[in-house]
Amino acid sequence: MKEQPHVQPHRFRVAMVYPQGAIQTQMALPPLGLGFLIKYYELHGLHKEQVEFRIFDENARKHLVEDVVAWHPDLVGISAMSFTRSRAFDFATHIRHRLPKALLIGGGVHFQVDPADGLTCQAFDAVCTGEGEEPLRRIIDEVLLGPAGRQALEHIPNLAWRDVHGHNRKTEHWMMKDLTGLPMPDMERFDLAFYLARRQFVPAVFAKSTIVLTGRGCPFKCTFCFNSFRDGKVRQHDIQQVVDHLAHLRAKYGVRHISITDDLFLVNRGRVRTFCERIIREMPDLRWGCQARPSLIRGDDLDLFKLMARAGCIQVNFGFESGCETVLKAIKGPDASLAKNQRALDLAWEAGLPVFGYFMCGIPGETEEEMYMTGEFIRKNFKKFRHFELFIYTPYPGSALAEQTRADGLLEGVTIDDLAVNNLVEGEVRVFNRLVPAEKVRQFRQEMKRMAMAKFPLRDKLRWLWIEGRDNPRRTFKRVVALYKKTS
């Protein structure tokens, strides 16, 4: 009897699309969220051997629609933040036209904030309204490869869609309870030539670097942040897993500069101590930075800061936001105070831990006098900052302050695309504050940015100009022009 040829089973293809958005908004931050989705399915999926994933990332490569269509995926997931929302819609419309049989799902922060907006793009079969790991697994296992087909969508958590009557529907909420068993994303999934190029990791530090996410969630309800609308339970990866991942990045790719992008890396002091001790013992040449909330820093954290400095921490990013007590509490909550901001800065300075300070101006309800108080805080502590940045407030969708801005009529005629480039490029950015003339806000920001630039020698400025200009010449040109143009 003649042996029958072996027939390879059909592999279901899942395309993960990451749009760039406006040309000025290109970012050299790998889309780790997409990597986590893939790792979750590889861990828990019922049909791992039948499913093939590929990330299509417009930050690193153009002509993505043609690339996606040529690959013929069965499922296309398109991620969207507020400033990439329009581009995500364009992708969905074109891909729906070219691949009418593919299942199209929208994901990302924008659809979590405003799922109804996502459904205005009728090319999407559904949008994801929360964390996507379990929804993606069930879409693959129950919709693509299950007997129920697309009817199963209504039983999958964290989804919104339109029913046959045109009504918006939404399923139950799901959130991952524990991250300890979730593997870290594979860097191989991303464009390594783009994401591991030498860039400015922290001000004046040009190195091969990348970001890592070691935890999720923030319980605080800052009114300017989209976290103000959702459950912010903090969950963290096992520190052993994190350190092993960093060792892998160091050994395989030569990465020795890491930015930890958790909202609250310092929330668990014991975990941070363990991390530092492991780094000192196993990777003493690693350099890293992290983010921290000033109000969480205690008076007895000096030793912790000194340990972090010994472990190679070369920058802590603090969101100080305002130099006015009234404004600070209004936007960050009652736990925030100028005294706590000052304590965090002073302890870091004493420990030899460099600080990057984030501030805002043009905040709705902020008076001119209150705005200038932020400048006084910066001047008073000028030597204690490695660097600082002052942004003009932009009401991104989903935050409580943005909703108040809309209710006050300050968003009339303003589109999401207008907001997308408001603070990602320089120039005549919009101001959403009736109490201070817009030109005064812009002049104040320019004054503070010039002060920040004065911290750097000419050599570092030229290196920044070369590296940033190579990545995004248009945005870099606009920044330089805005910084040095004459003001009235």
Image: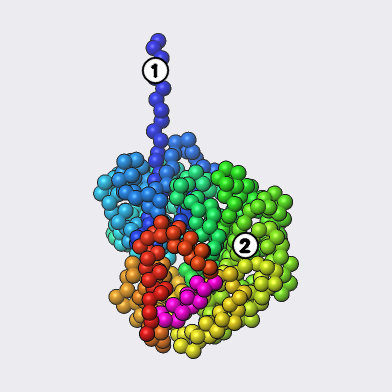
Residue at the disc numbered 1: 4
Q: Sort mark 2 into few (<14), some (14-19) or many (20+) by Cα contacts within 10 Å.
A: many
Residue 452 drawn in magenta: yes
Image coordinates for residue 15, horizontal then vertical, percent: 39, 46
Q: Residue furthest left?
A: 97
Q: Which residues are magenta?
A: 442-455
Tell me which amino acid carries mark 2. Answer: Ile
Q: Where residue 49 appears, x then y in whole percent? A: 48, 35
Point out the image quarter for the N terminus: top left
Would you name the residue on which mark 2 appears? Answer: 314
**Residue that lies at the very extreme toward the top in this rendered image:** 1
Residue 116 part of the magenta segment = no
Q: Is residue 234 above or below residue 54?
A: below
Q: Secondary structure at mark 1?
A: loop
Mark 1 neighbour class, 10 Å CA radius: few under 14, some 14 to 19, many 20 or more: few
Q: Which badge, 1 or 2, comes first in the chain's sequence?
A: 1
Nearer to the camera, 124 or 258: 258
Q: Are marks 1 and 2 in contact (CB under 8 Å)?
A: no
Residue nearest the observer in this picture, 418 or 129: 418
Residue 394 sits above or below residue 144 on the image: below
Principal secondary structure, stretch drawn in magenta:
helix
Question: Measuring 47% from the left and 63% from the top, which residue is drawn there?
Answer: 462
Secondary element type, mark 2:
strand
Q: Is residue 432 left or right of residue 222?
A: left
